Image: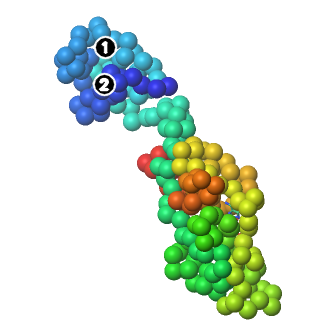
Amino acid sequence: MELNSRQEKILKIVKQHGPITGSKIAEQLSLTRATLRPDLAILTMSGYLDARPRVGYFYTGKEPAEVLTSKIRNILVRDVQSLPIVIKEDTSIYEAIVKMFLEDVGTLYAIDDDRDLVGVISRKDLLKGTMGKNDIEKTPVSIIMTRKPHITTCYPNDLLIYAANQLIEKQIDSIPVIDKDADKDIVIGRITKTNITKVFVNLME
Ligand code: ADP
């Protein structure tokens, strides 16, 4: 349920000044008590406010489940994306491992000379790369990375819930956020399980 702007104002007043009577709220909004009655009824019925006779309205501190759900549904990828760590596709496996440690990330994105996204390199990809007879200082990450068309991407205006679903369905740790530039996929961000955990914690707090 979306609150209208008057209901939002009432909620703010009660949060700041509660317990407060209906007439006092009306006074602050320069409205009559009668005009406010339907809004107060909605806020009380939906669990935001509680009322005690002769005491007035007070904020319950509860957010109805619906409110939480609609908040989550409105979060976009661009609201929470973090900076991507990008390397050239001819970077050696050794250098990529060093980069992963220095940048403290779990996934690197590989680009070509035109800055087009061409690969994703995870921790396990790098582990795999060190297992064979590869000379890891000479072998490029292009040998071990996941390539197009198998790369899962998202856009800044996608819903975060869509990206979160992709992480689960594809069993991956991160998704590059892409800006389309002509035919090129320019990596401008990343969505990771950590981003999503942070959103979860913020909502709960
Ligand atoms: P790890 O392999 O370290 O557990 P992931 O679960 O993210 O990390 O990666 C699993 C596999 O999926 C790896 O081979 C990796 O290259 C690939 N991968 C990771 N992210 C993506 C993505 N966004 N799109 C496609 N493949 C990916």
Q: Find residue 10 and name its label.
A: 2
User: Where does the image place residue 16, in percent across and percent down from the top left?
Assistant: 25, 34
The quarter of the image that holds ligand 1 is bottom right
Amino acid at pointer 1: Leu
Amino acid type, callout 2: Ile
Instruction: Give whichever of 183, 176 is nearer the camera.
Output: 183
From this viewpoint, is residue 60 visible? yes
Q: Is residue 161 left or right of residue 1?
A: right
Contact between marks 2 and 1 (CB within 8 A): the answer is: yes
Q: Which mark is residue 139?
A: none
Q: Nearer the viewer, residue 40 or 9?
A: 9
**Looking at the image, residue 175 lies above or below residue 19:** below
Check disc 1 and report the residue beneath it.
36
Task: Decide: is 96 above or below 114.
Answer: below
Judge from the rendering whether residue 78 lies leftward or rightward of residue 114; answer left or right: left
Does 106 sit left or right of 124 as displayed?
left
Label 2 Cα crowd, 10 Å radius (few <14 / some 14-19 / many 20+) = many
Residue drawn where x is 63% and y is 45% of the image: 162
How crowded pointer 1 is (Cα within 10 Å; few <14, some 14-19, many 20+) is rated as: some
Query: Which of the two residues, 16 or 69, is positioned nearer the viewer here?
Result: 69
Q: Earlier in the sequence, mark 2 or mark 1?
A: 2
Give the secondary structure at mark 1.
helix
